[in-house]
Amino acid sequence: MNNKVSVVGAGNVGATAAQRLAEKELCDVVLIDIVEGVPQGKALDLTEAAPIEKHDAKITGTNSYEASAGSDVVIITAGIPRKPGMSRDDLISTNAGIMKNVTEQVAKLSPNAVLIIVSNPLDAMCHVALNASGFPKERVIGMAGVLDSARFRAFIAMELDVSVENTHAFVLGGHGDTMVPLPRYSTVAGIPITELIAKDRIDALVDRTANGGAEIVSLLKTGSAYYAPASAAVEMTESILKDKKKVLPCAAYLQGEYGLHDLFIGVPVKLGSKGIEEVIEIKLTDDETAALKHSADAVQELKDILKKLG
Ligand SMILES: NC(=O)c1ccc[n+]([C@@H]2O[C@H](COP(=O)([O-])OP(=O)(O)OC[C@H]3O[C@@H](n4cnc5c(N)ncnc54)[C@H](O)[C@@H]3O)[C@@H](O)[C@H]2O)c1
């Protein structure tokens, strides 16, 4: 393959992302984890599936970073996942240490890479990665909105019994209970869902979307969602590798856009080979502005916790 993508964290999200990247023949994949044998075993298993899945992507599993050198994109999923009853914010201290360490190693060997951050608490981990990498803000991007809007789209399709391919959804804000789904910009075949679904049902779908992660955690009992999160990270990676310039909701470092400063928050961005090529600003209603502000306050709280932790 012409492109190289490294995935740090060979757990559920990382290994599934590696599988999807390879099966789409988007790139060679380097899978890195701290646990000895796990990335090697999963990489070998994926390699042995290649003849059946008909792809020629090389998948390397390793505990060190050398093989990741010169990556075009690095997806960081390293960390501990949320357990039932645990909020994303509880994870902050442990995962901040892991994120700092991983990012420093990655940045040294792949100075031109675009970083896609997956580990939770997402918005806070993006801040850690931005600082630890020293990369420009365009090349540190958080994965949250693509997942949240995919969940919203799945629920809209289920509600109306239509193809998921006809659905578009728009979600702003931080990744968590304060996310801001925007029904008036969410459509089925171009028709706003506000014209197709009754308000009380839209509210129910919005609520299910905002709690989408917790719903899966409570079903799985151990671990959190990974199929859809991996798909979301891979969609972002594909847009970057192919310079597709897809407009996707991602956590971006805002410096004045939407009236927010020095915060990672989910907004629509254009993703191309340089990373974030544009933050797209849309007009919000007063209610939506208030909801975004509420979400930004939650991210600011996480940032303050990080500051306290040093
Ligand atoms: N942004 C989102 O929407 C979203 C969605 C799903 C999961 N997540 C988050 O992604 C992360 C991964 O989730 P998962 O389900 O794959 O968890 P997992 O436990 O299956 O995998 C995490 C992996 O990270 C590895 N790891 C830990 N410390 C490391 C280090 N220092 N260096 C390299 N590897 C290290 C672990 O050994 C493990 O294999 C979690 O933080 C989870 O909360 C975020």
Image (tube, rainbow, N blue to C red):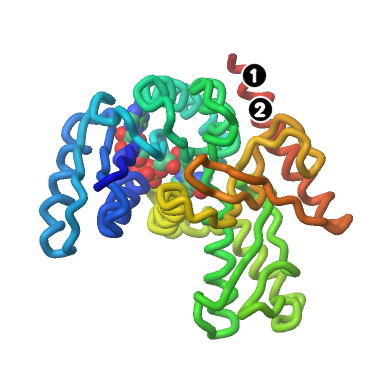
Q: How crowded is the residue under tag 2: few (<14 C-alpha within 10 Å), some, or many (20+)? A: many
Point 47% across, 42% down: residue: 118
Judged from the image, the quadrant occupied by ligand 1 is top left
Quadrant in the picture for residue 285: bottom right
- Type of amino acid at the residue the image marks with label 1: Lys
In which quarter of the view is residue 72 placed? top left
Farthest-out residue, top: 310
Q: In this view, does 85 lie above or below 220?
A: above
Give the x, y percent position of residue 283.
Answer: 82, 56
| Above or below: residue 310 compared with residue 165 | above
Q: Mark 2 points at which residue?
A: 303
Q: Position of residue 137 (x, y in %)?
A: 59, 32
Residue type of the residue flagged with mark 2: Lys
Toward the right, the furthest residue is 286
**Looking at the picture, does residue 66 appear above or below residue 163?**
above
Q: Residue at x 32, y 53 (%)?
A: 26
Crowd rating for badge 1 (residues with CA inside 10 Å; few <14, some 14–19, many 20+): few
Where disc 1 sits, the SS reads: helix
**168 displayed left or right of 232:** right
What residue would you read off at disc 1? 307
Residue at 84% over, 49% down: 290
In the image, taking residue 77 as reference, residue 52 lies left or right, namely left
Which secondary structure, mark 2?
helix
> Which residue: 15% across, 41% down?
41
Q: Position of residue 273 (x, y in %)?
A: 47, 44
Q: Are marks 1 and 2 in contact (CB under 8 Å)?
A: yes
Q: Quarter of the image containing the C terminus?
A: top right
Residue 145 falls left or right of residue 44: right
